[in-house]
Structures are given as structure tokens and as C-alpha cells.
Amino acid sequence: MKKSLIFAVISFVLLLIIPSAHALLIKTDSAVINSLDAGSSFTLNVGIQDAADLAGFQFELVYNSDIVSVSSVVLSNFLETPGRIIVKIAGISEYEIDNDAGRLSCNRMTQGSGAGADGSGTLAAITFQIKKWEDDFLNLENVHLTDTKGAELPVSATDSEIRPRYHISASATAGGSIVPSGDMLVKSGGSQEFIVTPAPNYHITNVTAVGYSEIAKGIYRFEHVVSNHTIHIEFCSDVPGDINGDAAVDLSDAILALRILSGIDTGKQMICSDADINGDGRIGIEEVVYILQKVSYRRVD
Ligand SMILES: [Ca+2]
Ligand SMILES: [Ca+2]
């Protein structure tokens, strides 16, 4: 299966929710960039919404340096207001890129007698170079926002881990198909559907998955995905007495039935618990007798 997702770009938005209380919330918005190859680049914006009297910011962005490196950082003039200018100190940079450790530190502040910055805008535009084609997550850490009086504005959800996509692994035994299959990525909050089709003379005997729903016969769906998932489908043949689901009734089925009957562990061997002959919902002596009769040709049905 051709992978179509390259890397998730996260824009961090610092949102002032209660201006009087200076409560701030980090809101993450993810978008997915398609068709980027190793060597290409993308730009991530760190922004703020509904700021009031903002005079300075500081944050660190942590990334996986095996996957991306930071190639440039452009700090915006959002903080500049009438009566306030950005503080520049010779020899001291407003940002520091450490592509070995995978860490970028940014800070900017203003001085003057005017009011601080209000409203919404971009604080920094960070351009990443893609080193290899893999998904990743970014951490925004040590976020500090300061008003013109030097007071720290409370920030909630700092050190927020951004993991915008989750893995779903789909597999099935012989005797049918699950589409799509294999490992796939799903956006956080997204959904993924699977169509399960038994081969002729086979049926679905077991679905191993957590948090799915069957929206129609053979159609399974994960809604609002916020964690990794696996889904595994077991098919069994419709042949009565076929304990191991290989569409034949032979000695291996008899041995499996005897092991089940004796309570002996059958290991990783798949068991078709619905290969029931007498309809009591379990594998018992009746199945052993039936299978042995089939094996010895005493039964022809
Ligand atoms: Ca069999
Ligand atoms: Ca039975």
C-alpha cells in the first residue's frame, strides 16, 4: 500500500479565553501535508489568539532529530505596538536551534511605555527540513507569556504532547479478507472503516479489536480515533467439525478437539469454537466422535 501521508504539521495556537483572568490555553490544530519527500521542507506557525497586553513570549519546541531538522526561524513583529519596540541585545539571539538534541528555544520581548499587543497573529514561523519519511510528534514546552507589567500570564496545557495521527493495524487469517489491511495512519479524532469479506464457504468467527462498532454486516468502524488500535479477523470454514478452520476434517481437528476437551492449552492454534456439531455451543466429545467417524470414513455426510 502506498503511503500517502508524510508528516503532520501542527500549528500551536495560544488562546486567551478569559482576558480578565489572563488564562491562556494552548490549542493544537493539526493538518496533514501530503506528498513531501525526504529533503523537502514545510513551515509550522506558532500563533496566538485574542492576546491582551502581551509583551513577551518564550517557548521550546521539541522534535525528533532523526526525522526533521529546523532550517530557519522567523520571529514575527506581532509584539510591536505604538510605543513599544522589540528588545535586541547584541550577542544574544532570540532563538537557538539544536538539531542534535531536537530542540528549538524561542523568546522575544518588547520594551516601552505603550500598551502590549492585542489580538491574534503569528509569533514565529519555523521551517523544518524532512530527513526521512515517517510520522512524528512535536512537543511544545516551557511556554511563558508575559504582559507589559512583567506579570506572567497563566498558561494551561504546557508541555502538551502533539501526536496527531495514530496507527491502526488490520489483519486476518486465511479464509477471507479485510480491506484495507496492514498498518495505516489515522488523524487524531478521525475514523477508519474496514470491509471484511469471507471467502466462499467461510464465515467470520471472531473479531479481536477494542472500541470498534459494526455498522453493517462485515463493516467495522473506529470512530474518533485517539489511540492506536489493532483489528484482527478470524475466519472459519463452514465445514462441520473443522476445528482449525482449514476447510478439511482430519486427525488434527480430532487432536485439537481432544485437547480442548481435556482442558489442555492449544497454544496459538486458531480454534473454530463454532465448529460445533450438536449445537451445544462448545467443543465436546460429540465433536471428537464425529471427527473420528469422518476420518475413518464411517460418516459420509
Ligand atoms: Ca480442519
Ligand atoms: Ca458440541
Image (cartoon, rainbow, N blue to C red):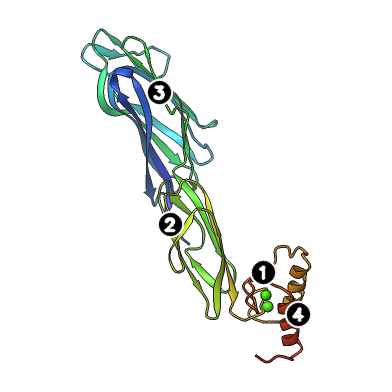
Dot placed on the residue nearer the N-terminal end, 3 or 4: 3
Question: Can you say whether 122 is above or below 198 in the image?
Answer: above
Question: Can you say whether 186 is above or below 95 in the image?
Answer: below
- The amino acid type, in three-letter code, at marker 3 is Val
- The amino acid type, in three-letter code, at marker 1 is Ile
Dot placed on the residue nearer the N-terminal end, 1 or 4: 4
Measured Cα–Cα span from mark 2 to mark 4: 41 Å
Dot 3 crowding, Cα within 10 Å, few <14, some 14–19, many 20+: some
- The amino acid type, in three-letter code, at marker 4 is Leu
x, y percent for residue 88:
35, 13
Numbered mark located on residue 155 in the image: 3
Dot placed on the residue nearer the N-terminal end, 2 or 3: 3
Q: Which residue is at a point 42% across and 15% down the rendered structure image?
A: 92
For mark 3, give the secondary structure. strand
**Residue located farthest toward the front when viewing the structure as drawn:** 280
Dot placed on the residue nearer the N-terminal end, 2 or 1: 2
The residue wearing badge 4 is 251
For mark 2, give the secondary structure. strand
Q: Which residue is at a point 35% across and 17% down the rendered structure image?
A: 56
Question: Can you say whether 272 is above or below 104 in the image?
Answer: below
For mark 4, give the secondary structure. helix
Q: Is residue 136 left or right of residue 291?
A: left
Measured Cα–Cα span from mark 2 to mark 1: 28 Å
Q: Which residue is at a point 73% across and 63% down the rendered structure image?
A: 267
Camera-near label (2 vs 4) is 4
* Quadrant in which the C terminus is drawn: bottom right
The residue wearing badge 1 is 271
x, y percent for residue 187:
42, 48
Camera-near label (3 vs 1) is 1
Numbered mark located on residue 192 in the image: 2
Measured Cα–Cα span from mark 1 to mark 4: 14 Å
Answer with the quadrant where ligand 2 appears in the image. bottom right
